[in-house]
Image (cartoon, rainbow, N blue to C red):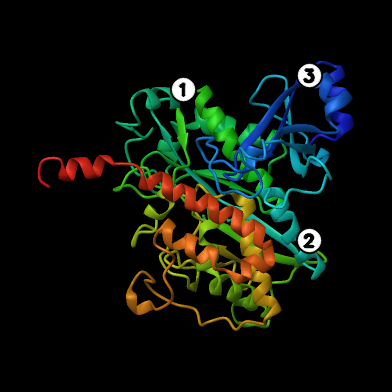
Amino acid sequence: MSTNYSFDMLKSAVSDGTIDTVLACIVDMQGRLLGKRFHAVNFVEISFEETHCCNYLLATDLEMETPDGFASTSWKSGYGDYVMKPDLTTIRPVPWLEGTAMVLCDVLDHHHHEPVPHSPRNILKRQIQKMNDLGYIPMMATELEFFLFENSFDEIRKNGFRDLTPISGYNEDYHILQTSKEEFIMRPLRNHLYAAGIPVENTKGEAEAGQEELNIRYAEALDCADHHTIAKHATKEIAWAKGHAASFLPKWHKDKVGSSSHVHQSLWKEGQPAFFDAAATNGKSALMDHYMAGLIKYAAEYTYFLAPYINSYKRFMKGTFAPTKTVWSVDNRTAGFRLCGADTKGIRIECRIGGSDINPYLAQAAMLAAGMKGIADALELPPATTGDVYQDTAGGRHIPATLREATETLRNSAMLKEALGEDVVTHYTRAAEWEQEEFDRVVTDWEIARGFERA
Ligand code: ADP
């Protein structure tokens, strides 16, 4: 059975010795799990109430640097603590680690115990609450694409990240033969996640050598983001345990297809799909039209939350199944937004802009904000595009082509400032600037090879 643990179930598992370790984790700005490993007895007796972490964890980068310019913390303010408040509805076994359970924590201010505004879980919770206040429950699914490599993370790092060899020799899109060879990683991944309460639908080979896709059943938005985060973490841990690397870098080679994380979205009311109207064209309700119009109108403003690094923008290439335009289309994989499940109760909009490096909490929150603005302003949905949307004749705005461009659209987004809060937008704009500053300092291999002799 796919199940979470109740706190009582955890206590029994601790007293009968099944569980001896509890991971208490927050989700950071990059969508990673960070936290502590508790002796399970300490957790169920004391630390389930709360624990603490340094507040730089929500003002850092992938390298755990301490950049300046964040209002929330700094060397000057002494890098104090945040409260990690375990969300006891998220306790689950971690079957791929011996004797271990996990709980996700909300991040609260150390002094007044209010949620930290720029904490990704809090940002998403606030948008879900606003949508609930309108009477709707957002249901989401995020696809996870990634590459498996022949060598381990440690071997690859020691080799300077050169000679990356995917685990398979050919494009394995939907291939059963090739993916059978990868079952020693993918089967435990599916089964362990399922046993951890994550409703895995399937895995499949993707459209490149060594590329995989993991699909998880759609769920309420917060659960979906939790599932995504844990599944991504599990993928890396299980691959590592088998001596291989799993990478969610969106574009690891210029000549290879990139990895995405498409986000499927629908709104529900009283158990019924509010995006479905049997009498309307495509079965698409007026509510869905407005939501989609908001998604499309504000796509450039929230692209940073779908593509947060320099590398993310290398994926947006014509003819690779990654989109370049903020247009919508019916079941068409060249558009930024694909209408799926037309004329059925499963009708939903798939945003195809996000790369495999998204933080799902931030991506979903930003899209809910855009969709809600579309509903509030009763925005009119532009007509669907057809055919090869990569062609200039298809019209539509371009997705920001670089992190620099996306940083500026984020910085100037009145919609996001109103929806997420000015402090939150300023915080993530600083993170985006820092990423660009770090890159701008680097002399790349490409420059050396191109100019060393010939410049
Ligand atoms: P693709 O063809 O883009 O690869 P998949 O069929 O692999 O799409 O994935 C479809 C995803 O959409 C699944 O994760 C599924 O749970 C999800 N999904 C199905 N119905 C809905 C819905 N009404 N709202 C949101 N997500 C949905």
Q: Earlier in the sequence, mark 3 or mark 1?
A: 3
Q: Give the labeled residue for mark 2.
A: 129
Badge 2 marks a residue whose secondary structure is helix
For disc 3, does the CB lie below 8 Å from ligand 1?
no
Asked if the residues shown at circle 2 and circle 3 are in contact, with their CB atoms under 8 angstroms apart, the answer is no
**Where is 118 relative to 35, above or below?**
below
Q: Which mark is residue 301?
A: none
Quarter of the image for residue 25 reads top right
Q: Which residue is mark 1?
A: 243
Secondary structure at badge 1 equals: loop
Q: Tell us which disc is closer to us: 2 or 3.
A: 2
Residues marked 3 and 1 touching at CB (< 8 Å): no
**Secondary structure at numbered mark 3:** loop
Q: Position of residue 181 (x, y in %)?
A: 43, 31
What residue does disc 3 label?
Answer: 18
Identified by mark 2, the residue type is Gln
Residue at coordinates 64% horizontally, 78% vertically from top-left? 290
Q: Amino acid at mark 1?
A: Gly
Residue sitting at the far left: 454
Residue 445, percent from left and from top: 26, 39
